[in-house]
Amino acid sequence: MKTTSGRGSLRFLTILLIAAMILAGIFCGLYLCREYTKVYRITNMGDMWSFVRINPGSSYFPFVEIDPMDFPHPPHPVPGDLLVAVDGRPATEENYFNTFSMKTPPGETIPIIFMHDGEMHSTDIVTRTVPPQLKFQIWLMFVLRVLIVTGLLFTGIWAMIKRTWSSPVRTLSLFCFTLAVHMALSSTIIGHLYASFQFPRELLILFGFIGISFAAFWLKLQLIFPERKPVYSEHRFLVNLLLFLPVIVLGFISMLTGGQAPALSVVIFHTLYLGLGLYLLLRNHRRAVSLVQKRQTHLVFLGSVSGILVYVLYNWFMYSLRWSQLQIPITGRMIMANAVFLLMLPVPVFIVYAFRKYNLLEVEGKLKRGSRMLAVNMILLVLFFGFLYFFGKEVVSALGIDSQTPTLVLGVGMAISLMPAQRKLRSIMENRIYPEKRELRILLKEYLAGSSRGMNEEMFWNELERKLARSLSVKAVHPVLRTAEEDYRFRSGEPAPFLPSDPLMGYLSRREGPVMLDEILESGVLPLTPRQEEWLQNVNCALVLPLSVKSGLIGFLAVEGKVSGDDFTGEEMLLLKSFSVRIALVAENLHLFSEKLERQKLSEQLRMGRNIQRGLLPDELPSVPGYGVAGMIEFCLDVAGDYYDVVKLDNGDLLLAIADVSGKGVGAALIMANLQASLRTTCQLGTPPAVAAERINSLIFANTPREMFISFFLACLNPETGVISYVNAGHNPPILLKSSGGFIRLVRGGTLLGIKQDSRYDQGELRLKPDDILLAFTDGVTESMNPLGEEFGEARLEEILSRCGELEPAEILKLIAEKVEEFHGSEDFDDDLTMLLLHRNR
């Protein structure tokens, strides 16, 4: 129970945090507005882009960078020369900025005097707008500063709102606010006189003192995150005094010197505190008492180490420039500053995730993957531009070629090969750094690719449990599946205490990737009942992998912890996420397949079904003058449900039909026999296709189970006129290739047969012209997949048809079957291939 004194202290700290938030937000907002005016002015005014080092109080400004385009005629100054006069006035700071101001237009000629080796020289400068490459760097720097300052402020506000009572969270908020101030004040490459308004010097000194204190809050954060260290708890006042004493001393010196705190002291202070903070962060990671704490500290380290190290190195580099003769172009300095901002940008994001204690490994995996992609792209870009420069400057010059065409051609060729090279190099890096990820990917990919053929549900789950447990080095994997009764059970039938309406199940249904159980429990983001917690702990669940398809969540995998006691890796989490949908799809397909076909009787049923269905097929197709007709069907190894028929009616008309029954085996063959009998009886009476479809539908509906239905296409050809009357009952639309080269799909009709008793069907009609080709097919043709999971599709079918007009109908069907088999990669298809082709040849 909190005491009155404790509540008062908390209230006081809350007020301080709110005050810090408001002050930091207002100052950063105003300062960035001021920076915007500087950026806007310098990128729109006329100026010279040969830079000088402006020393307040001096009238001699040394040139540090020369752009020859500033000078329309010689003499040109060189770096190190002194600017003595500008526009006839001494080169003081005031005169310089009065000459090159917002009012200075591009194209104005301004005389200057400079000193070279003790001698005075006169020349002219023609003002112009900022060069494009420098303009890009200037705006990029401003945008990055706005993003990182905004991100830090929102992170601090978020932390303050979420858990004001938590000491680590308060420290995080203050760290974010002070770092935001420091980042806003960082990088003064553009002179302050370009701004449209100025801050009082005392205010800048105060906030500069506040900004440098972020390093002290960073170090303090490592003393209390993820758990408070004993030394801090025992000597809290003394530790805080030691932490912030250097900040107080530096601030006092800064006030005494008018804001000119010793740069070396600040650099040493930041280096020492930030480096010590990283050391403590690693130490906290090694000594973490739980896997969640290990993930928290590891994520913060990965997200901040590159930014902090580059920031420290950049400060030392910039400090050393003051005492060396090395001159860095302003573009180079801006690139380095932008790199610092870019690497510091993710720091608040990863800290937020670490404090939330949720999705830590997934974020870590994305960070590592992004780092690898960045490294690969940087390597390739360096090689690309380096080789291009060498070729253009050395090889082309050595060959005496003046044209830049060879270099351009080489650049285009290398650019085209950049993406394949990136994928290959990234794959090599991953295989070297994370060989276990490659093994897991190969194992799951090969297993899932072959699991849909010749494997029942029991075999699938047994093999998946075994292979997944071995590849992840875990003790066991427990599939928990949703049943028809809307609950969840083990495969053995033992119930699990979950319902589709539970918060955890709702969350898993919206998520593809795995969820760590300890993160759920510690973060409290998803409420679990005591029974659910007990059940998950009894099965030693460490990771929950949802299995979802389009229809919803079909279950999940409860994965036990690793045998070694180690934690899962971010790479394993991303890989499991990429495979969860595929596992669910295979499982769902096997489940539906098992339910409909009763796999224990499948072999005999299929044999009988194929025999019955083959007996339904016409032995010989009728001959019709002026037309060519061909049909074919290829049964796959384990299904039989397609049918086609060609009948010459008594009145001379030609009847063509193709169908696919939803069910397979003996039941499908018997239904198809019923369909054939009904079709021939009905159509011999001269019944139009639409009426025939309605009658057949009524018979099918009355004599078949509700779960079985038929996709059906029926056409009646008048050979004399070439008119075809047809009806399409939910079948793949046949393709009509016109002699003119266009395609028409025959879609008019209605729903599948057997769905509704009183279905009505529309009848379509068209006229075949000489050289028109009509192709009807089942989904086994267009939905045949290659090893990459890509469907054959109707586009490939149309392309084949458009190139085989000179072939006979039977040859066309044979060619299509060969192309489908070539695309599929084997003769073992997952469905029947059935086609029926009609060609008017005169």
Image (tube, rainbow, N blue to C red):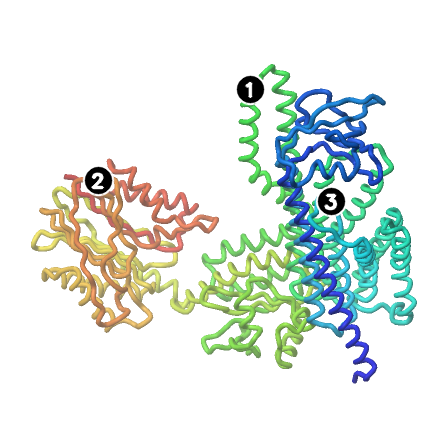
Give neighbour class at mark 1: few <14, some 14-19, many 20+ (Cα, 10 Å).
few
Give neighbour class at mark 2: few <14, some 14-19, many 20+ (Cα, 10 Å).
some
Q: Which is in the foreground here, disc 2 or disc 1?
A: 1
As drawn, 661 above or below 501: above
Q: Secondary structure at mark 3?
A: helix
Relative image position of residue 491 (x, y in whole percent): 53, 72
Give the farthest residue toward the top: 400
| Residue at x-position 21% and y-position 51% | 619
Does residue 267 appear anywhere in the picture? yes
Find disc 1 in the rendering and name its residue.
403
Q: Using the image as rendered, state which of residue 572 and residue 609 is in the foreground.
A: 572
Disc with the residue nearer the chain's start (2 vs 1)? 1
Q: Using the image as rendered, state which of residue 226 and residue 431 is in the foreground.
A: 226
Relative image position of residue 782 (x, y in whole percent): 35, 51
Find disc 2 in the rendering and name its residue.
739
Q: Using the image as rendered, state which of residue 472 and residue 740 is in the foreground.
A: 740
Give the farthest residue toward the front: 88
As drawn, 568 above or below 431: below
Q: Label 3 sits on what residue type?
A: Leu
| Residue at x-position 26% and y-position 68% | 754
Q: Label 2 sits on what residue type?
A: Ser
As drawn, 412 above or below 307: above
